[in-house]
């Protein structure tokens, strides 16, 4: 099926999402419960889940069901395949493997329609116009020969390319990215947050501006507050983030700044280390249950991310559940001396405020030991190093040692993603 045909196919689902995002809470919960019940029935028909769950569970049983680990996904996929004749073709996906563990997934048409509709809702809610002057920066492998591991992403590129969206690789030097945005008088840009950071730094170095730019959209990496401030300073625009994954389209940021869960598409739990529901404002693991993939449902899947739990409503009027903030994977978080996890993003803000660095990565080598790897025209001055060390100690403790390493470049993952913070501390 062609890209335009797939877009038309998803249109009724998208139109339904525009209504359901404002439903009364009771109606939304009833809808989610019905789809969760259907999901659990579909799961019970798969040998992997039948052995794991026993009798067919009900929606109210969800918090007591076992967590699905990343290592469980491959046997789950094989179990699904065992139900179909050999040689059956499936719509497949593969996680980026940025964390070092990639998983293969199977999707049915209902999941794909829901995913495409949810992604379109995020874009349109934030003023995106597919017919405007669009530039999207994506991983180079998605622009090469069609890769069966990334069918979903390649289909997205084909679909939007048919509207004239220009796709370019993230590997392109940021100075060239700025030149292209300026030459095309781009109104919309979509990129990884680290790519937005690079574009902003290139603008600051050259003194250029992008007066035609109307929206800055991003996804695939964590957006920290210092980057949002940087975008407002250089562009006068707010970043609008999409929390997606290979598994599903999870949440989106609205113009009021809140993260809304795509509750018609997925159910998200934020749980503490003991597996209990995290209280509002607390950090916890993200568990995902898909609500529209009846071929290979994911039930309480530990996707590997941490987020801040949230409750309540949003000033935009949408009744969809909220996430407080997405913090990234465990390997992106730091550990304190007592072994507890803490957000690494305040540390990013410490470095982003310094104009000397073109690019940087913060690596926690061990508890109390931080290494700042950076790209710059010259080594950091002694006073700059002392200032950074003092701020890191204020944040992570007086015993924190900070080392500095100037490098020629800092590589990205094959997907084009960049990890600005990395913890090498064993779990």
Image: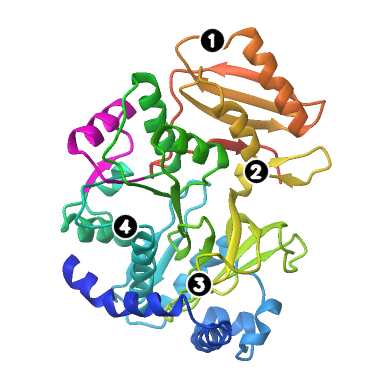
At a point 49% along the width and 18% down the height, the residue shown is 407
Where is residue 114 shown, x and y percent of the image?
38, 74
Q: How is the image coloured?
A: rainbow
What range is drawn magenta here?
A: 166-190
CA separation in Å, label 1 and label 2: 27 Å
Q: Circle 2 sits in a helix, a strand or a loop, which is it?
A: loop
Provide the residue designation for mark 3: 76
Provide the residue designation for mark 2: 333
Where is residue 20 shown, x and y percent of the image?
44, 79
Tell me if 144 is positioned left or right of 255 in this view: left
Which mark's residue is nearer the viewer, 1 or 4? 1
Which mark's residue is nearer the viewer, 3 or 2? 2
Provide the residue designation for mark 1: 379
Work out whether 227 lies above or below 190: above
Provide the residue designation for mark 4: 153
Residue count near mark 2 (Cα–Cα under 10 Å), binned few <14, some 14–19, many ≥20 = many
Q: Circle 3 sits in a helix, a strand or a loop, which is it?
A: helix
Which mark's residue is nearer the viewer, 3 or 1? 1
Which mark's residue is nearer the viewer, 3 or 4? 4
CA separation in Å, label 4 and label 2: 27 Å
Q: Nearer the viewer, residue 319 or 139?
A: 319
Q: Is residue 202 magenta?
A: no
Q: Circle 1 sits in a helix, a strand or a loop, which is it?
A: loop
Work out whether 49 lies above or below 178: below
CA separation in Å, label 3 and label 1: 50 Å
At a point 24% along the width and 29% down the height, the residue shown is 179
Q: Decide if residue 1 is in sight here.
A: no
Q: Decide if residue 327 is in sight here.
A: yes
Q: Earlier in the sequence, mark 4 or mark 2?
A: 4
């Amino acid at each position: 099926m062609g890209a335009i045909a797939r877009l038309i196919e998803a249109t009724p689902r998208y139109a339904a999402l525009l209504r359901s995002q404002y439903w009364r809470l009771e109606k939304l919960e009833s809808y989610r419960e019905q789809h969760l019940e259907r999901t659990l029935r579909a799961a019970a028909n798969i040998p992997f889940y039948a052995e794991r769950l026993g009798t067919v569970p009900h929606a109210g049983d969800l918090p007591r069901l076992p967590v699905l680990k990343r290592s469980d996904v491959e046997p789950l996929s094989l179990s699904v395949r065992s139900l179909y004749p050999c040689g059956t073709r499936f719509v497949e996906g593969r996680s980026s493997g940025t964390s070092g563990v990639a998983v293969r997934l199977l999707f049915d048409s209902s999941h794909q329609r829901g995913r495409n509709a949810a992604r379109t809702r995020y874009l349109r809610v934030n003023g995106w116009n597919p017919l405007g002057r669009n530039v999207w920066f994506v991983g180079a492998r998605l622009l090469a020969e069609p890769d069966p591991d990334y069918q979903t992403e390649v289909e997205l590129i084909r679909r939007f390319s048919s509207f004239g969206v220009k796709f370019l690789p993230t590997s392109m030097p940021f100075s060239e990215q700025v030149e292209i945005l300026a030459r095309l008088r781009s109104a919309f840009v979509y990129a990884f947050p680290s790519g937005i950071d690079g574009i902003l730094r290139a603008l600051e170095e050259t003194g250029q501006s992008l007066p035609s730019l109307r929206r800055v959209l991003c996804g695939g990496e964590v957006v920290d507050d210092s980057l949002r401030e940087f975008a407002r300073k250089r562009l006068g625009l707010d970043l609008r983030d999409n929390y997606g994954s290979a598994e599903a389209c999870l949440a989106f940021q609205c113009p009021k700044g809140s993260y809304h869960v795509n509750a018609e598409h997925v159910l998200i739990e934020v749980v503490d280390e003991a597996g209990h529901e995290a209280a509002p404002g607390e950090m916890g693991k993200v568990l995902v249950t898909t609500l529209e993939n009846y071929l290979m449902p994911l039930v309480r899947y530990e996707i590997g991310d941490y987020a801040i739990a949230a409750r309540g409503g949003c000033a935009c009027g949408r009744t969809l559940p909220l996430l407080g903030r997405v913090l990234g994977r465990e390997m992106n978080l730091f550990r304190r001396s007592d072994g507890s996890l803490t957000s690494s993003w305040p540390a990013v803000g410490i470095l982003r405020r310094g104009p000397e660095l073109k690019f940087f990565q913060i690596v926690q080598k061990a508890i109390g030991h931080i290494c700042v790897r950076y790209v710059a025209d010259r080594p950091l001055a002694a006073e700059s190093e002392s200032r950074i060390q003092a701020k890191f100690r204020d944040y992570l403790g007086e015993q924190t040692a900070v080392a500095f390493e100037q490098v020629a470049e800092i590589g990205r993952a094959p997907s084009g993603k960049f990890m600005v913070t990395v913890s090498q501390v064993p779990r």
